[in-house]
Image (cartoon, coloured by chain):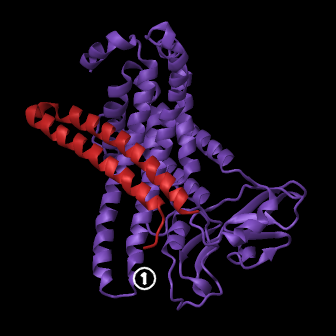
Chain colours: A red, B purple
Amino acid sequence: MTGSIAAIGAGLSAIGAGIGIGLIGGHAVEAIARQPEMYNKIQTTMIIAAALVEGVALFGVVVALMQGGN
Amino acid sequence: MGPKIKIFKQKSTLFLLVFALFSLVSLKTYASGQEEHPATESDSLSAVAPHVGGHEEAKEEKVNITKVAFEHILDSHYWHFWGEGHETVALPLPCIIYSSTKGVQFFSSAVFEHGHASFGAYSLVEEEIISADPQEKITDLSITKNVVQLLLSAALIFWIFTSIAKSYKTTGVTSAPKGKQSFFEPLITFVRDDIAKDNIGAKSDKFVPYLLTVFFLILINNVLGMIPIGANLTGNIAFTFVLATCTLIITNVNANKNYWMHILMPPVPKALYIMMIPLEIVGIFTKPFALMIRLFANMTAGHIIVISLIGLIFVFQSLWVSPVAVAFTLFIDVLECLVALLQAYIFTLLTSQFIGAAVAEHHHEEGHEGEEHAH
């Protein structure tokens, strides 16, 4: 087996983001089901939270990418 | 009608500012002592190969997908259209360098013949112009691919918005929009009402020009970057760095007393100040830093995925992989269309939230409830 250990780091950050965004999406669906009239507000909050989670995951990916190059 | 026209005027001056900052950041100074390195690390990921082997045979067995992918996402002194080796179709772009010994020099990148020729003491190694003279320090001010696309998108934005502004001037704001006006009006009112007004509040009008500039600059460059021969401008860290710096400056320049009080005298026991104040100060910079990384990494990652999926065909050297690869690429491309819009939206939204937090009148703790109802 060959490859860079940096790929494992990228994978781990993807797992983290997957869990985070999954929780956000799931709870947003629950919230919208409870209060459909709040749809717009929930959606905005959901996108912001997802962007923040994704931002952290992308830090991981960028570091892995940089390390993978060396 | 009046304020709207004024907004567009301010927008173009802001754009010039953004461009000026961009030019400053893309200054790269290379110590010429580095010229021994590139040859040894030419296989490394971080290095851009000078337009894959001009003298290599076309029927080369191994395809280095990483090299190809990085060539597509990084800046270049050529605008590469298609073809490899001797069949390369590329537009050479002007090189402007400031040399510490010879002053400003101006020539076309065609002199380097894709990195295979040198021009006087200069040669192009992995997209860096280096000098054979160890005494000479070069500052590269070249009009590279990304700069060309920035100028193109600036011209595009200028044309779109001046013509829309003109139609508001002639027909007024009450008549039905026509042509591209009807395409852009919902986007503009979306930025103004749903992004700026919702997050900043009463003072939002002052910031709408900046938010509109950022939104359309990112959106148009994201979309241009998705066209196969387009440059990956929004996936360039220098570009996102300038946008994030603008946000940092605008947020802190317009911040009111409450904002600074919250940073310098946070509502915590005095003993915690030694920990809280440095944290809050770091927080000023991490917010735009996250903006910078988010846009850069999202766009770069998208482009790498697309090129890697297409690259699978060449890795497996099989016709049967292509339907799968093309189907996946189509899927990712459609997803990227969404991401192009979403990233422009998120950047603008978070910028307006940072500004909103800095200009909010109320004090932090008691304010939250009140602000929610105000909307």
Please say whether residue B63 is visible from this viewpoint.
Answer: yes
Please say whether residue B5 is visible from this viewpoint.
Answer: no
Element type at marker 1?
Answer: helix
Horizontal side, residue B9 vs residue A13: left or right: right
Against B257, residue B47 (above or below) is below
Q: How many labels does the image show?
A: 1
- The amino acid pointed to by label 1 is Phe
- Residue at image coords 41%, 31%: B352
Horizontal side, residue B260 vs residue B168: left or right: right
Against B161, residue B89 (above or below) is below
Q: Which of the 4 image quarters holds residue B281?
A: top right
Question: Between B197 and B266, which is closer to the camera in this rendering?
Answer: B266
- Furthest toward the front, the residue is A1
Question: Residue B53 in the image: x percent, y percent?
Answer: 62, 81
Task: Return the residue at label 1.
Answer: B314
Question: Residue B128 in the image: x percent, y percent?
Answer: 71, 64
User: Dot 1 surroundings within 10 Å: few (below 14), some, or many (20 or more)?
Assistant: some
Question: Between A55 and A37, which is closer to the camera in this rendering?
Answer: A55
- Furthest toward the top, the residue is B270
- Residue at image coords 33%, 88%: B319
Circle 1 chain: B
Question: Between B140 and B42, which is closer to the camera in this rendering?
Answer: B42
Question: Residue A70 in the image: x percent, y percent?
Answer: 59, 62
Against A51, residue B201 (above or below) is above
Horizontal side, residue B81 vs residue B369: left or right: right
Placement of the N terminus of chain A among the 4 image quadrants:
bottom left
Question: Residue A10 in the image: x percent, y percent?
Answer: 42, 56
- Residue at image coords 52%, 19%: B275
Q: Which of the 4 image quarters holds residue B278?
A: top right
Horizontal side, residue B53 vs residue A25: left or right: right
